[in-house]
Image (cartoon, rainbow, N blue to C red):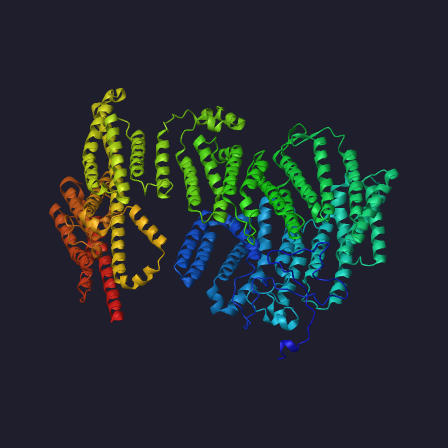
């Protein structure tokens, strides 16, 4: 094989250097692909990722990140959203669960597991999609339904292929597979995405113009994928042998795939139209024109794409490509223009043609065909010499005059459009700005005449506004649109003029579209259901505007502040599609302008001053808050639409606060990520808003009623007539819970420095305890002040104990045991007093006095038991919190002890390094140790020995209370013990209650508690059935009382060996050398099969599980020991 450096350099077309989007040439930039018969030798391909990977590699394959993620995302992300919408909740739930598992595996560095997790998630989601979607019934055809199901499955497969390319280890281990997957994506995505995009569009707007939708999506995806792209995983070293050109085998697609893409672009929309409209394709001239348009418009697009190398697979000769482009383009242009005349101009705009036939056909054809020919010749670079310039100028003058005659322009003023066309041609040929502005002035006069002649005398209203006002807005918008291109060519000192023109045009466009779209139901002083301005027009103008802003920004025609303003204005129009509010455009614009500066104005990382200063961050945060408050009416309307009724004041204020916090996230994340206080304040703001949303506290009227819309919604009587009268419940205690939670968050984030000030710590703990105590009393216990006082004292003791256990002071270690003792003593007192107060209040109630004695007793018993259950739940939570806090502190002490032991071992080696330690740093370290209170090991032995005992008491009381709650609420559920037994993991080793209990035995109480609970409840069930239960049990099981008791008791005893052996093993963790546990397995089988008590069956199943677990753990210990030896 001839080496590359000896091969002749063939012609290679050019691909744009942009990875994310194609780059269109501007007037002052050279065309990347020269259509001239003598092309420049620099006309060649460039790598899309050459800027990111400039280091050459010796190998053909170059592992790197996939460089075309943006293109694939544009195609596949909307498809995935559409498939999720079709599949519904089952598909979303399945995919979410699977991706969570894959994420966990990836975070554990199990790369292959994450890879297979992603694929299994997609497969499971596809199976759920087949069962949850109803494609066959939707299409009323089995073949179409199966075809649609196959399309959805194939798109899901392509998503999996795209996800596979993100794994770097696949590139390293299987380079050929990665190249094949990349080629598969670029070969298949245009077909599937265009079909699925068309399906989604038809579902939204109907089937009338489905072929044109498919044609448009085909053109978009052809431009994104069929234009030759360089592979992300090929080395660029070979390009040096070809003078900078990229070899053919470095392209992703081969000539075969490029040919298939071209055939799909040209013929698939036409075939789809024939298949869906076969009965009417020859019914009228417009239908025949549809056939020609669906072929020749993609054909013209294909010829334009050839300037970017789209026809590289046909020939590499520049002369042949140019000839193909000119000859075929001329013929296609004539056919397309003639069909557009019949299908669009005469069909939709015939009322504005003021010339009688047959002259109107001649003039319209001259205007459209001449204009298209001139534009095409200029776009292809054919206007290059004096003769072509004169011909182009003459053609422009003739087309302008013919167009003016067609719309009815007075013959007396016919030189006006001719002169305008002359100066427009002179601008294109001579680049004369003065000529362009003359054209703008003359063109503006013609636009004004056209509007006055056709619309000014109509006395109608359109979208809540007179037509004359709309004419003024339209004329101003057109004049600005014509002036901006000329302003863009002014010197850089005058670029503020183009910026002003663009912003003014964007404001006018937002106002016009807002009127057309949001006031579209008000026509002719009445109501009309027809939509005058469709949604796709809003989307199209938005993306065209954003593309124009990006192009002007890349060419340095406008500054960053103008880019920021225009981006916010154009993007705010999309809010109209989601929120039906008259002012949503301006509200969204204000909010975008307030939120986006950290993203758009301070993104220049090359400058040292690109970061915000603190005062700038504060100003931006204040502006964000004010803009959100300005948007409160839109937020109110959105919440009202979501809930179906006006939201409460707390809900509205909570959403405003949350939105403010989320809007400030870019400020903190991008510019103050190193400032811990800013992050803490942001967390506190978002938490405050979330608490307002959840609690919805009462808010004074003056806070929210500064709005007529909110006042009108509040004063409406529709809620009472629809929903009836709803008794209001006092919601002021929710403020106390909000205050308590916010104080806790402020203390956790060190906004309140309780860690360093004992007095502030005491005030904080008392304040939180009082707030929680009053909240609990007012929400759940409304009987007597004495009970309220006990609950408040209980919560204050809990708060003080937890806070001073976590941050102890000099004397707190002596007082905290007495605080806990008071808390334990308050439990029975409060429990008994609550019952007495509840009974007294019920008996004093007049409604209860009228009841029958039996009903009165039942009501009293239910009320007392319900209230006591709430009280038991409160104390269970308190003891759980204390046990958790003590367990955390003891674990911290053990860790500190281990660090001290490690420090003693390395003290000799650290002496030499401590001599060079800076004196100031040593002083700061000593100061930090002296100012931060913490238990030391010696103080633990002297003053903190009570902690394990207190933690054990709290754990046991919490477990006992939870067992009582299980009996009261569920009647003694069998499954509850498996949730309650892990509470005993909070037990600690002490010298009083649990002597000899260490970290090795931490699972022993859990296992013993489960076994003992099931044994005792089984015995109780047997006793209840024999002596107090069902009298007909003997008929059910076929035996007397003693037979039932003896049989089940014997089966219960058979489960004991497995449980005893497992509990011994959990206590000692000694390896079992014999097969004793396995021998006990058959003893559990009779209990599972023939027992009448469900708890005995559970004990038998647990016995088998315990034996298997014990055997596996012993086996692992044996293997670990052998490896160690």
Can you say which quadrant of the picture contains the N terminus? Answer: bottom right
Q: Is residue 484 left or right of residue 403?
A: left
Question: 804 or 254: which is nearer to us?
Answer: 804
Residue 917 lies, in percent from the top left, at: 35, 58
* Residue sticking out furthest to the bottom: 1
Query: Is residue 601 shown above or below 1074?
Result: above
Q: Is residue 124 left or right of residue 43?
A: left
Residue 302 lies, in percent from the top left, at: 69, 58
Residue 802 lies, in percent from the top left, at: 27, 41
Numbered marks: total: 0
The answer to whether one can see residue 48 in this image is yes
The answer to whether one can see residue 143 in this image is no
* Residue at 66 percent of width and 61 percent of height: 262
Question: 1025 or 919: which is nearer to us?
Answer: 919
Can you say which quadrant of the picture contains the C terminus? Answer: bottom left
Question: 1109 or 539: which is nearer to us?
Answer: 539
Query: Is residue 1105 shown above or below 982?
Result: below
* Residue sticking out furthest to the left: 1042
Question: 115 or 909: which is nearer to us?
Answer: 909
């Amino acid at each position: 094989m001839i080496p590359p450096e000896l091969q002749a350099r063939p012609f290679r077309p050019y691909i744009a250097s942009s990875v994310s989007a194609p780059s269109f040439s501007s007037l002052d930039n050279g065309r990347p692909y020269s259509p001239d018969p003598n092309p420049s030798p620099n006309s060649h391909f460039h790598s899309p990722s050459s800027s990111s990977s400039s280091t050459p590699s010796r190998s053909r394959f170059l592992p790197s990140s996939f460089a075309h993620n943006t293109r694939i995302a544009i195609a596949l992300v909307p498809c995935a959203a559409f498939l999720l919408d079709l599949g519904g909740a089952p598909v979303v739930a399945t995919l979410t669960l699977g991706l969570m598992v894959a994420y966990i595996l990836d975070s554990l560095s199990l790369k292959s597991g994450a890879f297979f997790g992603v694929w299994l998630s997609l497969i499971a989601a596809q199976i759920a999609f087949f069962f949850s979607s109803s494609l066959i019934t939707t299409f009323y055809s089995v073949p179409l339904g199966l075809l649609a199901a196959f399309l959805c499955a194939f798109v899901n497969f392509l998503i999996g292929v795209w996800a596979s390319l993100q794994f770097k280890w696949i590139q390293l281990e299987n380079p050929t597979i990665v190249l094949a997957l990349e080629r598969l994506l670029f070969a298949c995505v245009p077909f599937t995405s265009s079909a699925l995009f068309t399906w989604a569009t038809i579902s939204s707007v109907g089937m009338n113009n489905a072929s044109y939708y498919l044609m448009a999506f085909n053109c978009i995806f052809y431009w994104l994928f069929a234009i030759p792209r360089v592979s992300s995983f090929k080395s660029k070293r070979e390009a040096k042998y070809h003078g900078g050109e990229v070899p053919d085998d470095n392209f992703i697609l081969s000539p075969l795939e490029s040919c298939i893409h071209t055939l799909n672009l040209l013929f698939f929309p036409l075939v789809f139209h024939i298949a869906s409209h076969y009965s009417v394709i020859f019914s009228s001239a417009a239908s025949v024109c549809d056939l020609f348009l669906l072929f020749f418009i993609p054909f013209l697009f294909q010829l334009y794409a050839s300037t970017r190398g789209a026809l590289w697979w046909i020939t590499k000769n520049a002369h042949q490509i140019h000839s193909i482009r000119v000859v075929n383009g001329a013929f296609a242009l004539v056919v397309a223009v003639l069909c557009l005349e019949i299908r669009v101009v005469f069909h939709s705009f015939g009322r504005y043609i003021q010339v009688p036939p047959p002259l109107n056909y001649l003039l319209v054809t001259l205007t459209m065909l001449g204009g298209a020919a001139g534009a095409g010749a200029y776009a292809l670079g054919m206007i290059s010499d004096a003769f072509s310039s004169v011909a182009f100028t003459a053609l422009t003058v003739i087309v302008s005059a013919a167009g003016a005659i067609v719309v009815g322009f007075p013959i007396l003023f016919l030189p006006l459009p001719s002169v305008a066309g002359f100066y427009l041609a002179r601008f294109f040929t001579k680049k004369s700005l003065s000529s362009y502005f003359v054209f703008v002035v003359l063109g503006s006069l013609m636009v004004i005449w056209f509007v006055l002649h056709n619309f000014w005398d109509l006395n109608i209203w359109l979208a809540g506004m007179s037509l004359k006002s709309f004419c003024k807005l339209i004329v101003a918008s057109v004049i600005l649109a014509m002036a901006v291109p000329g302003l863009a060519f002014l010197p850089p000192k005058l670029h503020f003029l183009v910026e002003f023109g663009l912003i003014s045009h964007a404001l006018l466009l937002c106002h016009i579209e807002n009127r057309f779209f949001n006031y579209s139901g008000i026509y002719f002083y009445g109501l009309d259901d027809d939509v005058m301005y469709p949604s796709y027009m809003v989307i199209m103008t938005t993306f065209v505007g954003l593309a124009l802003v990006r192009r002007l920004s890349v060419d340095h025609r406008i500054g960053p502040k103008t880019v920021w303003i225009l981006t916010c204005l154009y993007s705010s129009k999309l809010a109209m599609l989601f929120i039906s509010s008259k002012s949503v455009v301006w509200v969204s614009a204000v909010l975008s302008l307030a939120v986006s500066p950290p993203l758009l104005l301070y993104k220049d990382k090359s400058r040292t001053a690109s970061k915000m200063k603190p005062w700038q961050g504060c100003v931006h945060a204040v502006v964000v808050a004010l803009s959100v408050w300005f948007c409160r009416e839109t937020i109110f309307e959105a919440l009202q639409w979501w809930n179906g009724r006006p939201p409460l004041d707390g809900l509205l204020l909570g959403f405003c606060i949350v939105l403010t916090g989320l809007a400030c996230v870019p400020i903190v994340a991008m510019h103050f990520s190193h400032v811990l206080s800013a992050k803490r304040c942001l967390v506190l703001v978002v938490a405050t808003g979330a608490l307002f949303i959840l609690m919805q506290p009462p808010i004074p009227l003056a806070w929210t009623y500064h709005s007529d819309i909110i006042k009108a919604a509040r004063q409406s009587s529709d809620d009472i007539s629809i929903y009836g009268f709803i008794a209001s419940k006092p919601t002021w205690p929710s403020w106390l819970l909000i205050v308590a939670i916010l104080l806790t968050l402020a203390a956790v984030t060190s906004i309140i420095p309780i860690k360093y000030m004992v007095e502030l710590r005491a005030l904080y703990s008392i304040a939180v305890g009082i707030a929680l105590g009053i909240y609990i009393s007012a929400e759940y216990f409304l009987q007597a002040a004495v009970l309220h006082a006990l609950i408040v004292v209980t919560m204050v003791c809990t708060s003080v104990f937890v806070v001073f256990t976590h941050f102890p002071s000099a004397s707190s270690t002596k007082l905290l045991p007495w605080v806990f003792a008071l808390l334990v003593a308050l439990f029975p007192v409060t429990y008994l007093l609550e019952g007495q107060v509840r009974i007294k209040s019920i008996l004093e109630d007049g409604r209860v006095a009228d009841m029958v004695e039996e009903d009165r007793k039942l009501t009293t018993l239910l009320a007392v038991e319900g209230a006591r259950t709430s009280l038991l739940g409160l104390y269970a939570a308190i003891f759980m919190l204390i046990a958790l806090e003590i367990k955390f502190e003891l674990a911290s002490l053990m860790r500190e002890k281990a660090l001290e032991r490690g420090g003693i071992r390395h003290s000799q080696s650290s002496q030499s390094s401590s001599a060079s330690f800076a004196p100031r740093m040593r002083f700061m370290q000593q100061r930090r140790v002296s100012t931060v209170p913490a238990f030391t090991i010696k103080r633990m032995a002297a003053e903190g020995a009570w902690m394990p005992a207190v933690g054990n008491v709290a754990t046991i009381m919490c477990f006992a209370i939870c067992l009582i709650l299980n009996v009261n609420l569920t009647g003694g559920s069998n499954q509850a013990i498996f949730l309650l037994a892990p509470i005993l993991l909070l037990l600690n080793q002490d010298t009083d209650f649990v002597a000899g209990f260490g970290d090795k035995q931490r699972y022993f109480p859990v296992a013993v508690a489960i076994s003992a609970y099931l044994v005792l409840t089984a015995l109780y069930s047997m006793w209840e059935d024999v002596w107090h239960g069902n009298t007909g049990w003997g008929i059910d099981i076929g035996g007397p009382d003693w037979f039932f008791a003896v049989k089940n008791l014997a089966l219960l005893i058979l489960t004991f060996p497995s449980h005893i052996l497992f509990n011994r093993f959990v206590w000692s963790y000694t390896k079992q050398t014999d097969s004793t546990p396995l021998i006990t397995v058959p003893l559990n089988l009779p209990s599972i099969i023939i027992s009448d008590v469900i708890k005995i069956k559970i004990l038998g199943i647990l016995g088998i599980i315990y034996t298997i677990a014990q055997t596996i753990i012993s086996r692992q210990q044996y293997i670990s020991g052998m490896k160690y030896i």
